[in-house]
Image: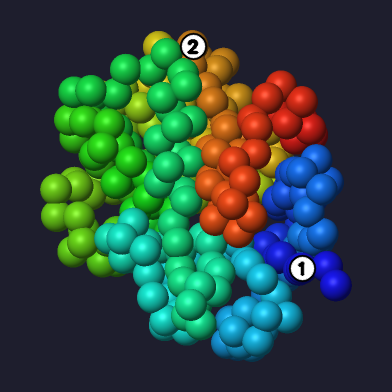
Amino acid sequence: MKKKYLVIGNPIDHSLSPKLHNYWIEKYKIDAIYEKKLLKNNEIVGLVSNIREERIHGINITVPFKKEVIPFLDELSVEAEISQSVNTIYKKDNKIIGENTDIEGFKLSLEKTDLETKNKKALILGAGGVVPSIIIALKKMQIKKIYLSNRTELKAIELKKNFPEIEIIKWGETLDFDIIINATSIGLKKEDEIDINYQQTSKNKFFYDVIYNPPETNFLKNAKKYGGITKNGKMMFIYQAQKAFFIWHKIVPEVDSETINLLNV
C-alpha cells in the first residue's frame, strides 16, 4: 500500500509541494503519493491522529498553521523548539515529531547567491510562522541588525519576546537597509501590493520574497524597476523540501537544473 504524504495550509492552491515531492518519489522509485489539503483549524488534531495511526506518514505545514500545530505534537526538534515554528511532521518511536526545515532552506538559498550578509542590516516584513526561521537563519549568517515591520504591531511585539535583539518599526517605514525580506502572504494574489517607497529604497539593495508562486510578485517587480536586486523563494522552498524528503525517506534528493526548472510557473 502506498505511503501517503500531505502539505496542509489555507490557502493551499499556490503550493507546488506535490509537484516537487512526487517528482522525487518517482525518481527514487518510492511507493508513495504526496497531495495537498486545504485545512481549517479544527481539522489539525484529526490529521495528527492519522499520522499516529500511520494512515498518513508525513505532513508539510504552510501558512497559517506552523505554530498552531505545535500543541498537538509529542516532541519538537531543537530548531522547531527555538523557532516555535514547525513545517514538517512525522512519526518516530511512536512519537509525533515536529521539525523545522525552513531555517536551513532560507539559509542555503541566500548562501547560494553572491550576497554578503555579514555586518549587514535586514528588514523583515511580516511576523507570521516563517519569520522566526528567517531571524534564526540571518543570525547564523552573522547579520548585524534585524528590523521587523508588521501590519499588526501586536504580533511583532509578541515575536520580540523571543527575539529581544530585533527592532520593530512602523509598517511602511523604510530606513537604510541592505536586505528587505517579504515574509507576508501579500503577493500570492496578482493585485497584492506592499506600500513602501521603492524609488527611495531599492537601488542596489537586495529584495527577497519568500513567495515563489507567482515567481515575481509586485514587491519584486517594483524593487527591480528602481534598481533593486531580487530573488524569490523558490530555492528556499526546494531546500526545505529536500531536508523534509530526507527526514521521511532517508534519501537526499538531488537539486539539479531539472528540479529547478520543474517549478517554473
On screen, 125 above or below 117?
Answer: below
Q: Secondary structure at mark 2?
A: loop
Disc number at residue 171? none
The image quadrant of residue 34 is bottom right
**Residue at the image point whose x is 59% and y is 52% from the top:** 250
Q: Locate residue 36, reporting x and y percent.
A: 75, 63
**Residue at the image point whose x is 23% and y is 23% from the top:** 118
**Residue at the image point whose x is 34% and y is 57% from the top:** 79
Residue nearest the viewer, comparing 185 with 255: 255
Which residue is label 1 attached to? 3
**Which residue lies most toward the left here?**
165
Q: Locate residue 89, reporting x and y percent.
A: 54, 68
Residue nearest the viewer, comparing 186 with 16: 16
Q: Secondary structure at mark 1?
A: strand
Let me know if residue 103 appears in the view: yes
On screen, 82 above or below 199?
Answer: below
Alpha carbons under labels 2 and 1: distance apart:
47 Å
Three-letter code, disc 1? Lys
Q: Locate residue 135, reporting x and y percent.
A: 30, 45
Three-letter code, disc 2? Gly
**Residue at the image point whose x is 71% and y is 65% from the top:** 5
Q: Which of pointers 2 and 1 indicates the residue nearer the eye?
A: 1
Disc number at residue 227? 2
Mark 2 and mark 1 lie on one chain; the one further toward the N terminus is 1
